[in-house]
Each structure stands twice: as C-alpha cells, then as structure tokens.
Image (cartoon, helix red, strand yellow):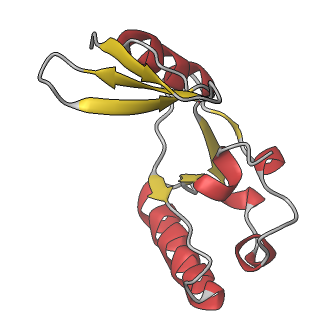
Amino acid sequence: VKGRVVDVADDGKSFCVELPDGKGMQVHRNQQVLPWPELLEQGRRTLRCVDWASQTEELWMDSHGMGYELSRPLGRGEIIDFFVSHSWSDPPAQKWKALKLVAEHFYATRGRYPTFWVDKVCINQR
C-alpha cells in the first residue's frame, strides 16, 4: 500500500499517512511498516510454538515467571495444532483442565501430543 505523509507529530514519534482511497492512518515510529511479502517472510522466520510437555499448570496461573524460553522455533514443515490467546481474566484452573483434556484427546487420536501457539509464551514479552 502506498500513501502520502500528510502530518508529522510535534514530538516526531508518529506521522499520519493519507492512503489512495482517501482514508488516513497514524503510524508510530516504533511500528514496522513492511510490504506484505516481507512481513510474511518475517513471520515464517520468527514463528514459535510450545510443546505440550513444556506446559504446566503454573504457567497458566502466573502472569510472571517462565514464558518465551519455553517456546521453540517452528520446525520446517511443522504445523501448529492449536492457537491460544491467553486472557488473565479467565479462570486459570478451568483453562488448564480444558487444555489437558484437549491434549489427551489429541494424543489418543493422533499418537502424539499437540503443539500450541500461546501468546504469553510465543511472543517475546520483554
């Protein structure tokens, strides 16, 4: 998408771009603005997953503690089995119980434990 810079914030930390359709968007200096093929390639290079064996009930109970170091890069040709966007307002014990049921059912039907993408673990929070 091409656009025209129409305004820059006084502090220089953001600018406003007018798009060809006349709509505007604000871009913060710390945002990466990449053409979609580069963004897709970056996603492929940095995509991570967490194995079921690396997860514990404590992981889901504690907003601090272990996180990114539990995840690993996705292997070539590997597919993530489940996507979990974690919310701290959900009851963690119930979520852990549900995840255990899902993982055990997956193992019983597929012969292996699933991989997960979990925001707390697969996005570097630091």
Q: In the rendered view, does 46 fall on the left or right side of 53?
A: left
Residue farthest toward the right in the current orientation of the protein: 65
Is residue 92 placed above or below 19 in the rendered structure?
A: below
Q: Is residue 107 above or below residue 56?
A: above
Q: Position of residue 19 (x, y in %)?
A: 22, 20
Q: Of 40 and 33, which appears nearest the observer?
A: 33
Residue at figure coordinates x 49%, y 43% from the top left: 80
| Vertical side of 126 occupied by 77: above or below | above
Which corner quadrant holds the C terminus? top right
| Residue 62: quarter of image | bottom right
Task: Please name the residue shown 74% across and 48% down the image.
Answer: 125
Residue at (11, 22) in percent of width and height: 21
Residue 20 placed where, x, y %? 16, 16
> Where is residue 111 drawn, in percent x and y?
51, 55
Left or right position of 83 against 67: left
Relative side of 81 to 32, left or right: left
39 vs 95, nearest the viewer: 39
Is the N terminus in the top left, top right, bottom left or bottom right quadrant?
top left
Which residue lies at the image location 70% right of the left edge and 74% below the top edge?
A: 60
Query: In which image quadrant can residue 104 be found?
Result: bottom right
Q: How many labels does the image show?
A: 0
| Residue 10 versus residue 116 in the image, above or below | above
Q: Which of 77 and 119 is in front in this view?
A: 119
Q: Which of 60 and 102 is in front in this view?
A: 60
**In the picture provided, is 42 more to the left or to the right than 17?**
right
Residue furthest front in the image: 10
- Residue 23 coordinates in the image, percent (x, y): 19, 30
